[in-house]
Each structure stands twice: as C-alpha cells, then as structure tokens.
Image (tube, coloured by chain):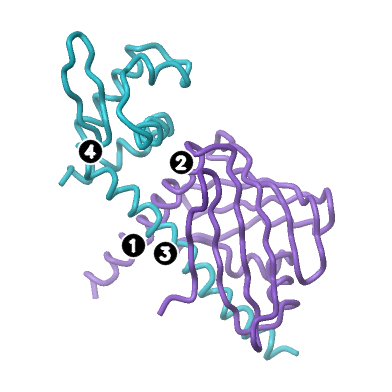
C-alpha cells in the first residue's frame, strides 16, 4: 500500500500523471519517456523519483538502464480515479434531480 | 442503486449515462439556461458558480467560473451544434489556470419512459489526456469525500 499523501502529491503534477498514463501501456526506459514530453532526462528522472517514492512505479536494474513500470498499487489508484469522478458527477446529477422537480412544481 | 453509469470507451472516450424523472425539454433547459445550471453544476459541496455564461446557439460561448471562497478555476467552451431538447455538441477546456486540451462533448436527451435518458459522450485528444482528466476528477471527488468524512466525524 503506497503512502496516500505521497501518492496524492505525486499525482497532483500533470507531467507525472502523463508518465503514469504512458507506463500503463507497458514498461519503458527514461530515454523513451523523455522523448514525448520534450523534457531532459534528468528532469524526467526527478519525476520518476517522486513516483517511485510514492509507491506508484517500480524500477529494476538492467545493465546501465533502469526501466520502470506501473506498480500494482497504481493500477488500483487509476481504478479509484474513475470511482471518484463517478462520485463527483453523481453529486451534480442528484442536485439536478432537485432542480428538475422544482421546475415541475413551477409549471 | 446508482442511476448513473460512467465508462471509458476505446482510448479516448468517456461515456456517462443518467436517467432523469423529467421530460427531455426540462433536462435540456437545465443544461443550457444559466440560472438553472448555477443550481446544480457545482461538483463537491461548498463550491458555487458565480459566473455562468451559456449562449445556447451554434458558435455560442460557454464560460463557467467556480469558487469555494478560497480557490477557483474556470471552464470555457463553444457550441458546435444544438437540436432543441434532444442534442448538444460543444467543446470545452478547463483553466487551472493553464488550459487543458479540448474535450469534445456530445450530449443527447432521449425520452425514456416518463422521463429522459441523458447520454454524454466525451472525446479527448489522446489517452494521456483522458487519464489526466479522470485524475483531476478524482482530486475533486476526493476533496468532497474528505469534507464529508470530516462532517461525519464531527457529528
């Protein structure tokens, strides 16, 4: 279980969310990650360090490379994103039910 | 039982459906008349929408501004197509304050028994944008749940 505070502050950054989205497609190297983001490798490495510290990614050593992949816990986090969006939208639509009921009464 | 469904479709779509116990005309109006929109399109508890511009005609502008008294953000958009009481097509983006990539949204309102079935189909430019959008939804939702939890714990 990743540290929730660390996970949320890691997820607050759009670049780190985009990195997670890329890793959802499979394991990759820092070099491959840096390319679409137009960022230097050290900059990407710093983001990866935050994600690793939050328990959202796992890295292994392969010669001089350290390929990274999504941690199983991060997959659960992504599922939770959907659940939370569902909750926020549900709150809106429950309010809309009340608005519609009031419109009916006014008629 | 939840009346709403939310699912991803392919790499770039998010589809939301919801049944309402009112005629399509009423549901359509609640999506296009500012005075009505301001009553429900608020997200988590504690947020209000002091500015609501919705020019319901093709090419018309949309601007929603939300605040919780401390922080705030806004959304801008343009209508592409409107079929009264049955269909809305628009593009929108959030400004937080940087603009997010355009979200293309098609909303349909179909008679469903005595009420309406709303289907909202969002199309994002790519999979990474969709993930980012879903994650910002999460952050908002989390805030609401934490606030509710706080209330529950206090009572």
**Residue at image location 75% in from the left, 77% down from the top:** B25
Mark 3 against mark 4, which lies toward the viewer? 4
Q: Which residue is mark 1?
A: B145
- Specify the colour of chain A: cyan
- Specify the colour of chain B: purple
Label 3 Cα neighbours within 10 Å, binned few <14 / some 14-19 / many ≥20: many
Mark 1 against mark 2, which lies toward the viewer? 2
| Left or right side of A88 for A95 | right
Using the rendered view, name the quadrant where residue B141 is placed. bottom left
Label 2 and label 3: CA atoms lie apart by: 17 Å
Label 4 Cα neighbours within 10 Å, binned few <14 / some 14-19 / many ≥20: many
Label 3 and label 1: CA atoms lie apart by: 9 Å
Q: Which residue is mark 4?
A: A71
Instruction: Name the residue nearer the viewer: A5 or B130.
Output: B130
Mark 3 secondary-structure assignment: helix
Q: Which residue is mark 2?
A: B132
Mark 2 against mark 4, which lies toward the viewer? 4
């Amino acid at each position: 279980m990743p540290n929730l505070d660390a996970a949320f502050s890691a997820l607050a950054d759009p670049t780190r969310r985009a990195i997670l989205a890329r890793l959802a497609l499979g394991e990759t190297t820092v070099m491959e990650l840096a390319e679409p983001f137009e960022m230097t490798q050290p900059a990407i490495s710093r983001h990866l360090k935050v994600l690793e510290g939050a328990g959202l990614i796992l890295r292994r050593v392969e010669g001089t490379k350290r390929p990274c992949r999504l941690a199983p816990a991060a997959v659960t986090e992504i599922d939770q994103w959907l659940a939370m969006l569902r909750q926020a939208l549900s709150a809106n639509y429950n309010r809309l039910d009340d608005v519609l009921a009031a419109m009916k009464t006014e008629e | 039982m939840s009346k709403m469904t939310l699912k991803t479709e392919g790499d770039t779509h998010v589809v939301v459906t919801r049944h309402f116990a009112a005629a399509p005309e009423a549901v359509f109006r609640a999506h296009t008349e500012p005075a009505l929109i301001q009553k429900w399109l608020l997200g988590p508890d504690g947020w209000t929408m002091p500015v609501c511009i919705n020019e319901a005609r093709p090419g018309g502008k949309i601007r929603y501004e939300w605040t919780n008294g401390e922080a705030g953000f806004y959304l801008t958009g343009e209508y592409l197509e409107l079929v009264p009481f049955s269909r809305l097509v628009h593009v929108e983006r959030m400004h937080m304050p940087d603009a997010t990539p355009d979200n293309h949204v098609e909303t349909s309102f179909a008679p469903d028994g005595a009420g309406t079935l709303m289907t909202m189909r969002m199309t994002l430019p790519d999979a990474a944008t969709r993930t980012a959008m879903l994650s910002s939804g999460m952050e908002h939702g989390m805030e609401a749940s934490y606030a509710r939890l706080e209330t529950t714990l206090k009572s």
